[in-house]
Image (spheres, helix red, strand yellow):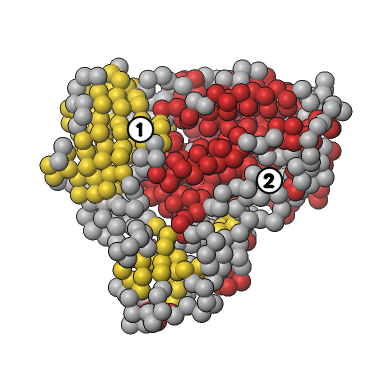
Amino acid sequence: MIDKPTISRRGFLQGMAAAAVARSGTVPFPARPQTPSAPREKLHVFGYSDVKLTGGPLCSQRDRIHDSYQGLDEDRLLKVYRQRAGLPAPGEDMGGWYDAEGFGPGQVLGQIISGLARFYNATGDTATQAKVHRLVNGFAATIDSDNYWYPSLKASTASAAYTLDKILVGLLDAYQFAGVRPALDIARRCVQGSVRYLPPRAYERFEAPKQAVYDESYTLPENLFYMFEMTQEREFGELAKKYLMDKTYFDPLSRGENVLPGLHAYSHVNALCSAARAYLILGEPKYFEAIRNAWDMIEKTQSFASGGWAPNEEFVVPNKGLLGESLTKSHAHFETPCGSYAHLKLARYLLRFAGEARYGDGLERVLYNTMLGAKDPKGDGHVFYYSDYHPSTQKAYLPEKWPCCSGTTPQVVADYAISTYFWSQDGIYVNLFTPSEVSWKVQGVPAKLIQTTDYPESGSSELRIELAAPCEFTIYVRIPGWLRLPAQLALNGKAIAVSGEPQSFVAVHRRWRTNDTLQIHLPFSLWLQPIDEQDPNKVAVMWGPLMLVALDSSPQLPREFIAKSGGGIKATAYSPLTFEVSRAPEKLLFVPFYRVQDEVYTTYVQQQSA
Ligand SMILES: [Zn+2]
């Protein structure tokens, strides 16, 4: 029996709600919260503070982005809000999307607060906590006596729901993760000040009022349910239910009808997280069915080899070769920070509900091949936005400053920590292989798991256990679906039989003692991922979980050198994760997408016919 060191307030509340549902059968809205052992969750997330990233590329990117956002000028971030409130508003305009008449006035302030609150919780950096306090206080000072809080008239008419969604997550995270106690009441005031500007229901873009085409009210429920969890005030749950887009989206998805083609991709994947939260709170199975079916539709018919999806931000009609066509027609193949933020969140919800390793595989694939490959934010509002799979291209920043992706960038990298491990009643789940430590309790005994690895430079990792007293529990290790050779496990240096098939969690159950070690070896190999059925010879070259790209300064790739099954490519001796094509007249190098900086690269290459 495993217990968490401290049951979070949120977890406690959730469990009480599940208990209430169990007692009364169908409850339209739970009066009481749930416990972490709620039957809807097979696995549970750790808190940010339970998991420490201690090295490797994920930690390094998280820390660089933390530093970048910690360095943002607070006067500038608050300027549009202060100007509208008639307060002194020092500092330069932010520019780009952020200004009063920009595409999304003041919009990403909430997500920046959210990201900083998560960074503080994960790292304990008190300067970050102080910044969260100052930003929340500075924002609160701009709210009018009638609770009007929007940064401009444009924000309250064109993006009332969109801006509310983002400020809510910032305030709730500030409350929950950075100890900003007044933030909850400020969030209440924001909802009250928003109600008169919100639409009567969730609209799809094509049916939305003209002035609010991009308002995306269908993403609101996730954070309104979060508000309900924090406050236990029924009105927020009722408001969340009002924006669940059942008729046109969740109902057909739950029946297996693919309604994705033509929809704006990121906001609709983010809306799936609203369905996930609805399942968690309301317990209606259709929401679980909807997200499970949507995940499969996205993975099987919408995804590039990276795991990213939706060229030009729109889901395609499946099985028409449109992903392949997009390679030369577009440079906007995956909206990376926003898309990976929603994808990782959705994967964690599905891991919690289903406990299946395939969602961990999908999480790993998108993380390593999209977000980890993002160029670092410049600090002036320019961020990496689209992953580009066009031949002979380069990574670039979006020309406009402070787009949506500048808000999700800090959130998604902060979430790497809580994507690494999960826990259940009988054990701990290792989902990602990255240098890290996780602390919890087994039957009241403090426990720590310390992971040492140079993954993904190699497929080896070692888990060492620290325990105050011997304890019986299970360590579950994700055996990835990309494995072509069997995984090898060793306990304290002695090989153990592994029954786990690829794409499952293998269970190692025993009475663990302090300093016990579990060695894991996941042999990487080369494999090819075709773009689609219409063009099976146009392939991405994969190395284990990593999508490789050809470093290519000429527009024409010597395509005949890619043999079937990747046989013509081998690892170089002089640089890790660098591969060369042995038969090329001029040296042709492949490296993981995440390693590319300013080099010209090509993602999909033509495979030689048999
Ligand atoms: Zn975005």
Residue at the spot of label 1: 437
> Helix, strand or loop at disc 2?
loop
Real-space CA distance between mark 1 and mark 2, rounded to the nearest whole angstrom: 33 Å
Q: Position of residue 197 (x, y in %)?
A: 79, 35
Residue at 30% over, 17% down: 444
In front of the other: 137 or 193: 137
Question: Amino acid type of disc 1?
Answer: Glu
Residue at the spot of label 2: 380
| Residue 168 numbered tag | none
Question: Amino acid type of disc 2?
Answer: Asp
Choose top left, top right, bottom left or bottom right for residue 228.
Answer: top right
In front of the other: 250 or 600: 600
Quadrant into which the C terminus falls: bottom left
Q: Earlier in the sequence, mark 1 or mark 2?
A: 2
For label 2, the crowd category at 10 Å Cα-Cα, with few meaning under 14, some 14 to 19 and many 20 or more, is: few
- Residue 214 visible in image: yes
Q: Is residue 194 left or right of residue 356?
A: right
Q: Is residue 183 left or right of residue 103?
A: left
Position of 590 relative to 84 (above/below): below
Residue at 37% over, 79% down: 584
Residue at 74% over, 38% down: 106
